[in-house]
Amino acid sequence: MAPSLESNKKVGNGRGEHLEAAEEEDDLAFCTEKMLSIVVPMALRTSCELGVFDIIAKAGEGAKLSAKDIAFHIGTKNPQAPAMLDRLLSLLVSHSLLSCSLPQQQPPQKFYALSRRSKYFVADPDGISLGSSVALILDPEQFIVEGGVAFDRAHGMHAFEYPSVDPRFNEVFNSGMTGITTLIMKRILELYKGFDFEHVTKLVDVGGGVGLSLKLITSKYPNIQGINFDLPHVVQHAPVFA
């Protein structure tokens, strides 16, 4: 016996209600995720500022440290530091920025190690890592909630003018740009062959900051003359690269 039209309507309404409920759950999950999306960058920033990645790296290849071990190397006297670090580092583990093991022991204790991706937050011999770029992006003085250009409203001038009057921010800005510029430019020079041709004899970097990109390029291609062009307060304190 064929189902009645009324039965089909009820089934259809049921499916529609189920779909609507599922979409609402997805929307709520999506919005909650966006609301909490700042948590990971802030945890990453805190870990970089505390030197967590460097502490684990200095312990040796394959080292596994507990939150208590890391807190000891940080040098804090806060008795709650290990527990607070444990929560922070567990979050980074869930995003593959660290790895974690839990040996069978009592009481249970997590041990943290560098993951494959952690290397980008470990300072290289020149002190370069993405940690300084995290500090730049999340520098609290850059944020304001009212309209217009946030930085301009907060400081009364453009972001590229402000470093000339605030040495601290100038250091934060230059350090942040140094980290990301070095990592990316080194990779570019591994893959890009456009400078191999002899007709490139002079290269001008407009807005080149302290001249790091030119330094990396001319170190590989000494036949190129590099000219760094930037604002007076930038080039005034830029190092001289031979």
Image (cartoon, helix red, strand yellow):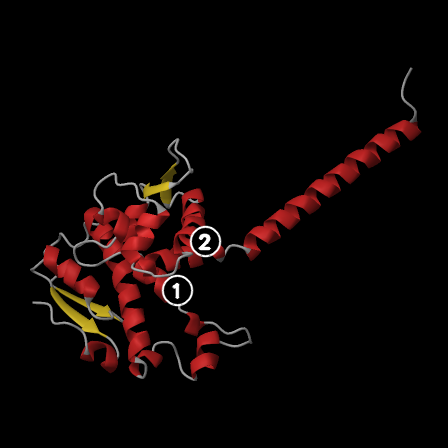
Image label count: 2
Instruction: Give 102 or 225, whichever is nearer the viewer.
Output: 102
Q: Position of residue 162 (x, y in %)?
A: 35, 80
Q: Residue at x 43, y 70 (%)?
A: 140
* 177 is higher (above) or lower (below) than 29: below
Residue identifier under label 2 = 40
Q: Residue at x 42, y 74 (%)?
A: 141
Residue identifier under label 1 = 137
Q: Position of residue 117 (x, y in %)?
A: 33, 44
Neighbor class of circle 1 (other Cα within 10 Å; few <14, some 14-19, many 20+) is some
Q: Position of residue 73 (x, y in %)?
A: 27, 54
- Quarter assignment of residue 198: bottom left
Alpha carbon distance from label 1 to label 2: 13 Å
Amino acid type at image mark 2: Val
Neighbor class of circle 2 (other Cα within 10 Å; few <14, some 14-19, many 20+) is some
Q: Along the horizontal axis of the image, is 219 left or right of 135? A: left
Instruction: Give 110 or 158, whichever is nearer the viewer.
Output: 110
Q: Along the horizontal axis of the image, is 182 left or right of 18? A: left
Q: Along the horizontal axis of the image, is 92 left or right of 11? A: left
* Residue 12 is at least partly visible in this image: yes
Q: Position of residue 185 (x, y in %)?
A: 23, 56
* 228 is higher (above) or lower (below) than 222: below
